[in-house]
Image (cartoon, rainbow, N blue to C red):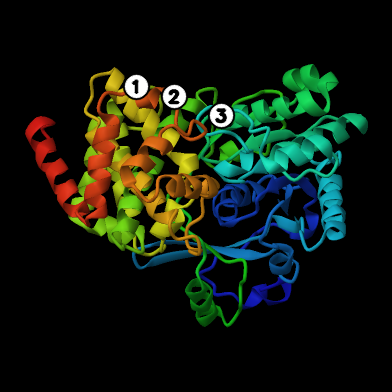
Amino acid sequence: MNEKNVSFLPETFQIPKYNRNTLSPGLVHLGCGAFHRTHLMDFHEDTLEHQRGDWGVIGVNLRSPDIDSIFNPQGGLYCRQLRHGNECQTRLIGGLLKTISVLNTNEKIRRQTIQKALQVTSSKNIKVITMTVTEKGYCHAPSTGMLQENHPDVAHDIIHPNLPRSVPGFVLEVIKRCIKLNHKAPAFISCDNVPRNGQTLKDCVLKLAEQVCPNLLQFIDDEVIFLSTMVDRIVPATRKQDIVQFQSMTNLIDSGLVVGEPYRMWVIEKDERAHLPDWSASGAIITTNVHDYELIKMRVVNGMQTALAHLGHLSNFIYMSDVFSNEIYREFGRTLITKEVLPNLPKNTSIKLNDYVDETVDRLINPAIGHRTAQISSDGSQKIRHRLIDPLHEAIKTGLPYYGLTIALSAWIYHIFKLSKDKDQKEISDPFLKTTIKIRNKSKNDLAIFIDKLLEEHIIFPVWINEIPNLKKEVYLIAKEIQNNQIQRILKNYLSQSKKYYLV
């Protein structure tokens, strides 16, 4: 796939109508992975069709994989496919002009590539920096949202701020360079599933600045723009079979191919100071109310995914569509969200909550995109606070049922208990796995002791979780049943009780 063979693509493919040679860089994206290339770049491609000029995109990866080896041979071109059932819409994305990968082959190469990334990102023509770096990229404690100053990358950046390893360190160094070059810093836009993601990034950067450049704290707080967003589109990791299938359609190899669902939503925090592309003309919502949209999406879509991914993976389902094709699992997810979460969500957005739940179930049952339960189960320690624990706490405070949320939390706890025994597995990752392995070893493989010690791990869990009456006991009893391969029985009993008490 490159400029020379674009003309050989099928007529059904959507091809850019603009001249790529007229684009110049105006936006850098950190974390140029599958989600960014399927979601933001899709909106941006729509925008480039009517607003061209200086809004070309440079993709930067501060971590593996090496995207240069994929996109340099392709001149930045790649296709995104939207699949639902038997339908497939393919679009050639032209807005990605170049990529820069920070390589960790050795210290010399890392220094060279990080300096290249910093030089490009802090140049005057870059007006916006967007990012999808996942929850763990912020180097914050999920239970508090604050920077982990003892995180190895953060500790490194305090000593070597001009050679950053962390995302907050990279952002801070870009700001410092812009100040030194006497031009305005770009607007930073967070596109990850982190509550108040823009504010979280700002808090982490300010905390790091206290150690590195305290004289700039007030300036950064007052003058640098950090915007929160809500992003919504289901995008699994691209599989080899997706690339092979594309090759059979086109006789071309697209190593940058991405696959997602047709549904998309993007809500961006409004700030008149920010110079942004005209994304609203492409369907993005610009609002001062972004946090309510963010809360709804995280509690409904991500909450349902997290609740069912661990249960599904523990039940040997490979794909989320397999989980949601099973009526027991599907109705568990629907009932949990509808009865235990929805009543506490904001009502002042354009989202119709009950319709959104039904729409989410329809999206998750889509078999065409191949979203693996193992992928969604990864990094659960970063996700459960906002997707399961906070809604559980709110349900208790407002007198709602919360047993379904307890089942989902217990599934994650047993999942991490099981994961902590298998040190050699590569399918699922979690940044706190080393910690949970230590807890399991100290617990001598006793599930009850493991749960006691894990719930006292306050980087993951808030202090108040141990004050919830009988929660620890319920978690143990459910986790023990899961250990005894009784997941379906647990869910059937839950649904039976729901019909009796919640009038489902």
CA neighbours of label 2 inside 10 A, class few (<14), some (14 to 19), many (20+) = few
**Which mark's residue is nearer the viewer, 2 or 3?**
2
Residue that badge 1 annotates = 467
CA neighbours of label 3 inside 10 A, class few (<14), some (14 to 19), many (20+) = many
In what quadrant of the picture does the C terminus appear?
top left
Residue that badge 2 annotates = 463
Residue 25: x and y in percent read 79, 49
Identify the mark at residue 145; answer none if there is no mark: 3
Residue 12: x and y in percent read 50, 69
Residue 352: x and y in percent read 32, 32
Q: Is residue 135 above or below residue 418?
A: above
Between 343 and 354, the one lying in front of the other is: 343
Q: Is residue 419 above or below residue 251?
A: above
Identify the mark at residue 387; answer none if there is no mark: none
C-alpha separation, residue under disc 3 versus residue under disc 1 = 21 Å
Asked if disc 2 and disc 1 are in contact, CB closer than 8 Å, the reply is: yes
Between 9 and 242, the one lying in front of the other is: 242
